[in-house]
Image (cartoon, rainbow, N blue to C red):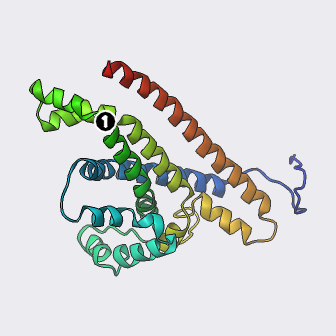
Amino acid sequence: MHANFPPDDTGTRSTPISADDWTAIELSLRIAAVATLACLPVATAFAYLLARCRFPGKAVLDAVLHLPLVLPPVVTGYVLLLTFGRKGPIGAWLFETFGITLSFRWTGAALACAVMGFPLMLRAIRLSFESVDQRLETAAGTLGANRYWTFLLVTLPLALPGLLAGAILCFAKALGEFGATITFVSNIPGETQTISSAIYSYTQVPGGDAAAIRLMLFSTAIALAAMLLSELLNRHLQRRIAVFER
């Protein structure tokens, strides 16, 4: 016996989320998680460098690292395709040396999402490092801690809210990324089709509005849950830091 679903505004019958849609959702979450984890150590290192060090060309480096924020996503995706594609300088080397192919693979989508989300994470972490009271770091140094132990035991814990905020921003950006991903890895169901590209595909076919709206609502719910979790964790960390600073 088949369940009858009420028709939507387009006149088509509403159906549950299909197996292909669940695949797109799972793939989006995997890509966003991998992109965020890959960005975190790199963004932390560059954020600390920009927040605490002075060196020639610092402004240029800062501008280059934030380029994905101002470049059209399609341009970023095309640059990735030229660089990491099978015929690109890095892509050809990866394939010939390790047999790794990034273009038209979900790993390539994770790379594109990492590049697009990196500036957001970098800025949040940098601001967090800049807000850390350096007198606490000096005090740790007078107690015998070297620069590395001071960073690990004092600076990094105090900057955790910024790291968390940056990770959530990167995750949310990766979850909704479209232009760079579709340019670099295309829109292949089951391999590179994320929630965003699946929604785009549904909008291009008659009667696909209902499925597109369902995926849109699901994506919104995931992003909202991530933001709420981030807020709860941030409040907990702020209370812990307040106790530490006393």
Residue type, mark 1 in image: Val
Q: Which residue is depicted at the point 79% across and 58% down?
A: 210
Q: Which of 173/140 is in front? A: 140
Q: Is residue 152 above or below residue 3?
A: above
- The quadrant the C terminus occupies is top left
Q: Which residue is depicted at the point 20% across and 32% down?
A: 137
Residue ID for mark 1: 132
Q: Which of 244/135 is in front? A: 135
- Taking 29 as reference, is 128 left or right? left
Q: Which of 185/220 is in front? A: 220
Name the spot of residue 64 as percent of width and height, x first.
34, 67
Secondary structure beneath label 1: loop
Q: How many marks?
A: 1
Q: Which residue is depicted at the point 35% across and 65% down?
A: 63
- Taking 243 as reference, is 201 left or right? right
- Taking 127 as reference, is 235 left or right? right
Q: Extreme bottom residue here?
A: 87
Q: Is residue 74 above or below residue 22?
A: below
Name the spot of residue 179 as percent of width and height, x first.
54, 69
Q: Which of 177/134 is in front? A: 134
Residue 222 visible, this angle: yes
- Taking 51 as reference, is 31 left or right? right
Name the spot of residue 166 as percent of width and height, x first.
43, 46
Q: Is residue 182 above or below residue 53?
A: below
